[in-house]
Image: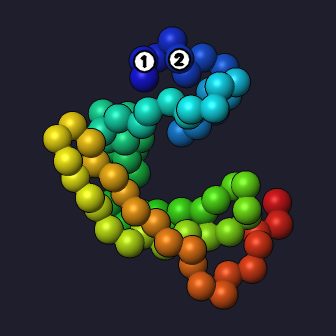
Amino acid sequence: MNDTDREDTAPGAFPPHHNSEPPALTVGDLKIELSRWRDDAVVVFRCPLRGQKLRFYRFQASPGVIEIELNDYPNTPAIRA
């Protein structure tokens, strides 16, 4: 993703897309965003469609792809926005 793709988008957010496939998040994109944060900052995962927290499970790697696996956070009520 390049800087022109991020126009009119809040920091840390990807622009809305009208196709079914979201844009790929690259390691470079992730490094840029994470470099803005202190090492002791807490990372929270959540699903905005279900309004629930997710818990990090593990990384899986294959050539050219890093997969971050998340699980539902047990007994977590929906988050009300």
Residue picked out by circle 1: 2
Cβ–Cβ under 8 Å for marks 1 and 2:
yes
At x 42% / y 36%, what residue is drawn? 25
Q: Quadrant of the C terminus?
A: bottom right
Q: Answer left or right for 63 relative to 19.
A: left
Q: Quadrant of the N terminus?
A: top left
For label 1, the SS is: loop
Measured along the vertical axis of the image, is residue 64 above or below residue 66?
A: above
Q: Quadrant of residue 79?
A: bottom right
Amino acid carrying label 2: it is Asp
Residue placed under numbered mark 2 in the picture: 5
State whether residue 60 is above or below residue 3: below
Q: Residue furthest right?
A: 80
Q: Quadrant of residue 21?
A: top right
The image quarter in which residue 36 lies: top left
Element on which disc 2 rests: helix
Q: Residue furthest top?
A: 4
Residue 55, horizontal then vertical, whole percent? 49, 73
Q: Is residue 45 visible?
A: yes
User: Crowding near pointer 2: few (<14 within 10 Å), some, many (20+)?
Assistant: few
Q: Is there any visible trace of residue 32 in the rendered image?
A: no
Q: Give coordinates of residue 54: x percent, y percent.
A: 55, 69
Q: Nearer the viewer, residue 67 or 52?
A: 67
Image location (x, y in percent) of residue 69: 40, 62
Horizontal side of 64 relative to 53 (left or right) equals left
Residue 59 has which mark?
A: none
Judge by depth and name the residue closer to the eye, 59 or 80.
Answer: 59
Location of residue 44 in the rendering, given as x and y in whole percent from the top left corner: 52, 65
Disc 1 from disc 2: Cα separation? 6 Å
Residue appearing at x 29%, y 61% in the figure: 59
